[in-house]
Amino acid sequence: MSDPTIGYTKKKRSRLPIIIGLIAALAIIAGLIYAISNVSNKSSSSSSEITISVPLEPTNLNIRETGGVALDQVLADNIYEGLVGFVSGTLEVQPVLATDYTVSDDGKSYEFNLREGVKFHSGNELTSRDVVTSLTETLGSMATVDATEEHTVTIELAEANSGLVYLLAGRDGLILEAEATNDLANSANGTGPYLFEEWKQGDSITLIKNDDYWGAPATLDKAVFRYIPDGKAAVNASLDGDLDVQVAVLSTLRTEFDRSDDFNLISASGTDVFTLAYNNNKAPFDDVRVRTAFSQAIDVDEIIAALEGEGKPLGGPITELEPGFLDLTHINSYNPENAQKLLAEAGVENLKVTVTTPNFYDAVVLDIVATQLSEVGVELTINPVEFSTWLEDVYTNKDYDLSYVDHAEAFDFFNYANPDYYFGFDNAEVQKLYSESLQSLSLEDAANKLAEASEVVANEAAAKWLYNYTPTNAISKKVQGFPESNTNSRINLAGVTIVE
Amino acid sequence: MKRFLITRSFTLLIGLVLSSLIIFVTLRLLPGDVAQVIGGSQASPEKILDIREKLGLNFPLHMQYLDWIKGIATGDLGNSILTGSSVQAEILQKAEVTVPLTVYSLLIGLVIALPLGVFTAYRHQTKVSKAVSLFSIVAAAVPVVWAGLLGILFFSTWLGWLPSQGFPREGWDDPLAAIRALTLPALTIGLIEGAILFRFVKSATFAALDAEHVRAAMSRGRTRFNALIGHGLPAVGLSIISMLGLQIASLLVGAVVIEQLFNLPGLGRMLIVDVGNRDLLKVQSTLFVLTAVILVLGALIDVVHRLIDPRMRIGE
């Protein structure tokens, strides 16, 4: 310890902090200048790589357990295949892993001949055992599946079901390897032309070419499905040149593509039905007059105009792509005077109801519905909730007046024949016609019965089918052969090429 | 100092336990259920029950909480209900976007705030200073989303200098592309953050200019500027450090919003998706980690403050 001295001595201060600060500041400024000056120097991707943006990401990859079309959209056709499948962009059934099949006269027994030399991505050969294991699991008590010979599989149905081939071409028909031990939630092992490479959660799924494919070889080396939930960000990605295809461009943002010559905008037909469901079990919607009044109070043309034409009017639950389609738009078409009369007859005046809807749909549709309903004296409250809340309140607990949701799945008419579904629609005639349709021996008869049933459903105003969504896809002019319909449920990459 | 460390660690621990409880309980109040999300709108009630059973969602809540806390205490954040993947790994992967974004924003904020703040306080009468101050009031009040949209419009759409969205799939293996991708989002947050910090630096510098020890230095013959840099700024630095502790929380919130806007696969976007899917285990672990980061940083800043500010050690 030294004695305290009086006076001022200059303390030596380190200049290090100032120097570090200066260097950091300069580095940042240099970084910014670099970032800005390095204008759009995109690494030119090899010619056979495609990047496709899709709005909705699957919650996990387990195709056996996880619902929703987001999984089929990417994994079906490209990675997983069934005995039969759909011709790309349609709902026409064609043989895939089976070379052919026969149906017994009573429609109860199907025999499939398996293709030989098909390999799973794990390297193992496809056997009838894999088919039996997969289909026994998905068909459950509906059928008994047996391997009669090494390459023959029979399906014995408990009851005839004309819809079986559609079922087998869909999710339930996909064949997984019986012996596989891969983690289904995070990987995928199928027989398709593309291999699963990576799922970056919250970002993308990447597929690469399967060089060992049994059929026509994949036309792309790599396909990246990017998940961009924000519509504006997706358009920006397209315009930045990051995307080759953008599926389902928001209608209000379509004009943004006027700035670019690189894309074709293509309207894709599909099976998405935006459904305003009535709670048929609950007053006042247990009264057909009230349901009819609601259906007639809504002018779907105005809605479709607001969506910039991205939808087709629909009078019933079945879309043009599906079997059993009938133009039913004349049933319960716009007639507000009659709607008012019907409401008065039913004795419900000054009605106040709430529509529950997942919060990710364009709000404009329900705003229009609310305005139109107010013109016949109905006060509509719009209650946007998270999808998980919708599933609990509406789908499971059936605690709702009206619901607005996209029924994207194809062949989903059976929901109107099932009184336990959240629609609560219980009509003996529809149930009878539906079961007759299942028991029909030809697909044509089946479709006719379905059409008849859908007409009853429309006349009973089981729901209001606001529109059949026809999303616009922005497809780069470099891309050829991209499917032009049904892209919201399945994107089959077969035959898609990139030409520079 | 030792006593301070012990009491500070104790309050930190209480803070962590309380926040874990709050996070756990509030998440259970949300309607909806992950089993329904998995099943979707076509699954039968039996199938949903089956999924619930498989996922172990039928355990009593207090058991679930204790299980979770026990895991955290042993450094295990659990697995996602939906994908079964490790939450730790997911957080680390997404942090590769969020942490650099936060640091980048903070640096930009500091680069803006420090020199301008000191300068405008030093020369507060000039027109330039007044203009800068006025601009900072506006910038500090701008919502992040709006600023981000303006940034996209200006830098991407008109000038075409910066990408308006996305993060390279190669991540940091392509560091230049990664920095480019983060630049516009970081500028957005950094500008707003800088405006807030600027006002703080300015008033702290103002106070320092007037402080007795600075005036004393001037009376010993130093110039006003020299006295400010040599004697005034250390005190300014201290107040900025404590201010930063408070700002880290708001920086993280800004990152959550901006990640959605710029389509960046970071923690913020992951949280939004997971909440929507009701992957509660993953959400609660992620939220807990974020809360813990903020609480621990707060504690660390308190300690650092003590270490470098002799006035706080008086009486020990």
Image (cartoon, coloured by chain):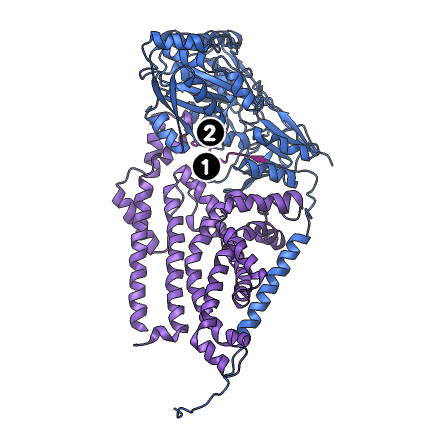
Chain colours: A blue, B purple
Decide if residue A126 is in sight here: no
Please state the extent of the stretch shown in magenta in the rendering: A53-66
**Are tags 1 and 2 found on a single chain?**
yes
Q: Are marks 1 and 2 in contact (CB under 8 Å)?
A: yes
Decide if residue B254 is in sight here: yes
Q: Secondary structure of the magenta portion, mostly?
A: loop
Query: x and y percent of residue B46 in the render?
Result: 33, 26
- Chain identity of mark 2: A
Q: Secondary structure at mark 1?
A: loop
Per the image, the residue denoted by label 1 is A59
- Chain identity of mark 1: A
Q: Based on the displayed image, in which of its 4 quarters is residue B58 positioned? A: top left
Task: Check the picture and name the quadrant holding the C terminus of chain B.
Answer: bottom left
Disc on the earlier residue, 1 or 2: 1
The relative height of residue B201 versus residue B252 in the rendered view (above or below) is below
Amino acid at dot 1:
Thr
In the figure, is residue A284 to the left or right of A34? left
Decide which of B42, B293 is in the foreground and name it. B293
Task: Check the picture and name the quadrant holding the N terminus of chain B.
Answer: bottom left
Q: Secondary structure at mark 2?
A: loop
Decide which of A173, A495 is in the foreground and name it. A495
Per the image, the residue denoted by label 2 is A68
